Image (spheres, rainbow, N blue to C red):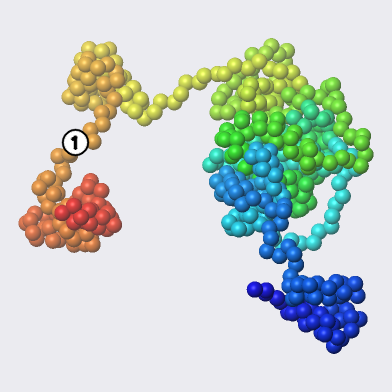
Amino acid sequence: MIVMDSKAQLTVDIIAKIVEGRITIANGAKLLSKCRRTIERYVTRYQQVGIQFVVHGNSGKSPPNKTPTSIKKTVQALIKDKYFDLNLLHLAEKLETDEHIVVKRETLRGWAHDIHHVKRAKRRRGKARKCRERMEAAGLMMQMDGSPHRWFGDKKHCLIAMIDDATSEVHAEFFPSETTAGCLKVMRDCIETKGLFKTLYVDRAGIFGGPKRCNFSQMQRACNELGIEIIFANSPQGKGRIERAFDTFQDRLVPELRLNNINAIAAANAYLKHVFIPQFWQSQIQVKSKHTAAEFTPLPGYANLDNICVIKDHRKIRNDHTFSYGNKFYLIDSPLKYSIANQKIEIRNTSKKGFTAHFAGRKLAVTEVTEPGKLVAEDLAVQKKLEVLALVEKLGNVSMASRQSGVSRDTIYRHLKLVKQGGADALKRQETPNLRHKNCVDMAIEKAVVQFSIEHPHLGQQKVALKMTEALGVDVSTSGVRSMWLRNNMNTTALRVERSQALQESA
């Protein structure tokens, strides 16, 4: 059985008429838009095999370069179970390196579409913006930002990165969150590796000295001391180099960390610096600048990064040469020729070494001052009792001490007995949560009120008091009903309804 479309049917009809002599070869070539040589070959094939000449010889045959079905099923199983969060290009690379399966990207696309498992990028309509060319040399501009994301594990961590605008060379590290200390550390690593750069392109976050923290940002202060100019971007697209780098990191690095079972910051930083950036970023993303000579400058001899890339605060010295920092008091032990009272000292806080105090460029030796804490109310009560007992011992007469202190003799005798049995600690107030006050109503009346309130949970305290007064013949006040409800944790309608439903279910 031969199945032909409309074009094949027209070809057979024209060739048959040519063979019958009803039309010429020239006219048949015009009708089929073929050359004369092709029409002659069609006529020869028609005379030999009939209308089968119109069917191509490879029809119904598998192509010789077709990938075996077993490999296709294996790859689809790997996509579902192991490589479910990789894009197609990344998937092709991992199959070749880890599974030793070489498959073209478009073939993978078809196989992934067959199982409805294709990772697509988010497409949003954006505004038209003018393209800004890269800087001509490395070191002229560095872009910096942080990206909070679930990079590994279940918690979010922040990847703080710096990227060279000219070459896309990146310096990055993971931190628990985007903090000033993290930004200073990444900038310090970049300076120690490459040298001082000219400008830093950042967003308007407070960490970099944006509107919320203008003129007192630690990053802005450190850049000013190093001679680095900060440029603030008006939109995320302005520093698009680092924004697109984060897209690549989230697309590539997250699956890599998952496949290597990395769940800690230390392991993630080691993999990022020693594996991912050298093997992937430097070989496929990093480019060469227009000018081969870089604009990085070596750090001057007088500049010490230990004194610059730290968090600095200032404290005012008191008249006794003490200052407070971190809710603690410190005394200056360094020998000083003149008093520095009312002067400001510089506090350099480093997370590893604590902090150091400096005045006029000189490091000061300080020690923590332990101040006596304030007595709490319970300690004050015990102190008053001990003072009364001391007065008894001084006078040698309990009655005279009672008249002078205003404390009854029974109380004094009780305190003397407690001190004899357990010392001063025995004078502290003992908690008696299960003690029932003598002014409370009878327990039978309280049980009857509680039972009636559970049976009628929507009645208020006034109606319950009236009903129980009539039923028991005892005067039950509204405030008394309220106190009973509070003691039994049923002072609201919702609590009483819940207690009523629980009893009904248990019954």
Mark 1 secondary-structure assignment = loop
464 vs 304, left or right, is: left
Residue at 16 percent across and 44 percent down: it is 440
Is residue 154 in sight in this rendering? yes
Residue 341 horizontal/vertical position (percent): 67, 22
Residue at 67 percent across and 51 percent down: it is 67
Q: Is residue 345 above or below residue 168?
A: above
Residue 49 horizontal/vertical position (percent): 76, 72
Residue 253 in which image quadrant: top right
Q: Is residue 185 above or below residue 135?
A: above
433 vs 57, left or right, is: left
Residue 91 horizontal/vertical position (percent): 66, 46
In the picture as drawn, the residue positioned furthest to the bottom comes out as 22
Front in this rendered view, residue 476 or 202: 202
Q: Disc 1 marks which amino acid?
A: Leu
Q: Is residue 502 above or below residue 220?
A: below
443 vs 365, left or right, is: left
398 vs 10, left or right, is: left
Front in this rendered view, residue 72 or 82: 72
Q: Crowding near pointer 1: few (<14 within 10 Å), some, many (20+)? A: few
Residue at 84 percent across and 82 percent down: it is 18
Residue placed under numbered mark 1 in the picture: 435
Front in this rendered view, residue 47 or 105: 47
Residue at 66 percent across and 27 percent down: it is 349
Is residue 215 in sight in this rendering? no
How many discs appear? 1
Residue 283 horizontal/vertical position (percent): 79, 38
Front in this rendered view, residue 327 or 203: 203
